[in-house]
């Protein structure tokens, strides 16, 4: 048995319907895959419907589960409401909301435009608020209980971090929302918890955060006392437990899974202090070039 193996018993999530925002790629896709393997139906959302349709075909073939892809920009409440309706119409009810959709980039804050700052706030904080409010209102109005909201935050939600200020600010807001609603909505039978992952490499996110050879120059594994980055199955195991009935008495908690990284040195991106201004210019050009190609 090792950390890359699956934790829960077969059918641990059988009969549950789980909505995963940003479920078509990266960590969202890894968690979605494990939920399907454990018997859940999963709704995956993002702005790119074609990509979601391809993921549906791939994961249904791989797991034998049922995936509903729904195009949804979480920044827009009307689209979120439509996603709730589509999910309920397809599966009858939704048991779990996993707020995973996010955006991030590294930059000195003084280089950011107001719009760039807003983009991250709108996806991470406003998007989480939109989904939480839409599903919460639906569950409360329908008098449905035994519901779970799981939010993906980050360790710098509570430590802060230089060079990712919009993300740190937004994630801190999500964490406050998690703890606040865990108390306020418990009476409706809705639990709230969060996961704060450390370094879990995903191609899309890490290419944006650390383009070019920066991944080698700034090896985040060196900041982790365990001297490695996380395996996607480790995060999927934790998420599956937190959305399962096995965690029914866990409410209002943020579980850190980072190998001890934040304890070793708060501020995941503080090491970027060593980047000279000339390299920031080069990085900005590389990031803009990559964005224009995508």
Image (cartoon, rainbow, N blue to C red):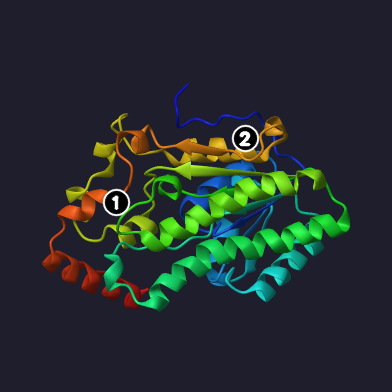
**Residue 103 image offset from top left, x and y in percent:** 44, 63
Q: Which mark is residue 26?
A: none
Residue at image location 58% in from the left, 40% down from the top: 239
Which residue matches tag 2?
A: 241
Mark 2 surroundings: few (<14), some (14-19) or many (≥20) residues within 10 A? some
**Quadrant hosting residue 243:** top right
| Position of 86 relative to 234 (above/below) | below
Q: In this view, does 90 lie to the left or right of 260?
A: right
Percent coordinates x, y for residue 136 in the rendering? 75, 57
Q: Up-down: is 268 above or below 262?
A: below
Q: Closer to the camera, 188 or 86? A: 188
**Whole-number angstrom distance, CA of label 2 to CA of label 1:** 29 Å
State the image coordinates of residue 174 (x, y, percent, origin top left): 55, 54
Residue 229, compared with residue 98, is above or below; it is: above
In the drawing, does residue 224 fall left or right of residue 50? left
Q: Return the residue at label 1.
A: 269
Judged by depth in the image, the label closer to the viewer, 2 or 1, is 1
Residue 92 in view (yes/no): no
* Secondary structure of the residue carrying numbered label 1: loop
Q: Nearer the viewer, residue 125 or 195?
A: 125
Q: Residue at position x 25%, y 61% from top?
A: 211
């Amino acid at each position: 048995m090792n950390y890359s193996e699956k934790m829960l018993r077969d059918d641990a999530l059988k009969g549950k319907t789980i909505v995963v925002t940003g479920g078509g790629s990266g960590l969202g896709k890894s968690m979605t895959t494990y939920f399907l393997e454990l018997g859940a139906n999963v709704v995956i959302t993002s702005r790119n419907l074609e990509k979601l349709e391809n993921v549906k075909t791939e994961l249904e073939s791989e797991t034998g589960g049922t995936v509903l892809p729904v195009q949804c920009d979480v920044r827009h409440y009307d689209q979120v409401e439509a996603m709730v309706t589509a999910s309920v119409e397809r599966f009858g009810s939704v048991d779990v909301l996993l707020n995973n959709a996010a955006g991030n980039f590294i930059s000195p804050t003084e280089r950011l435009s107001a719009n760039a700052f807003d983009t991250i706030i709108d996806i991470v904080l406003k998007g989480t608020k939109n989904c939480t409010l839409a599903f919460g209102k639906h569950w409360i109005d329908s008098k449905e209980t035994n519901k779970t909201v799981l939010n993906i935050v980050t360790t710098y939600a509570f430590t802060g971090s230089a060079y990712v200020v919009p993300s740190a600010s937004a994630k801190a807001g999500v964490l406050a929302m998690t703890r606040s609603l865990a108390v306020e909505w418990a009476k409706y039978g809705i639990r709230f918890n969060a996961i704060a992952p450390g370094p879990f490499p995903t191609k899309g996110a890490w290419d944006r955060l650390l383009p070019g050879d920066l991944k080698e120059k700034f090896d985040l594994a060196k900041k982790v006392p365990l001297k490695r980055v996380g395996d996607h199955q480790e995060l999927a195991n934790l998420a599956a437990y937190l959305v399962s009935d096995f965690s029914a008495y866990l409410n209002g908690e943020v579980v850190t899974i980072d190998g001890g990284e934040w304890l070793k040195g708060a501020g995941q991106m503080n090491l970027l202090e060593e980047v000279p201004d000339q390299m920031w210019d080069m990085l900005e050009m590389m990031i803009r070039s990559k964005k224009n190609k995508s």
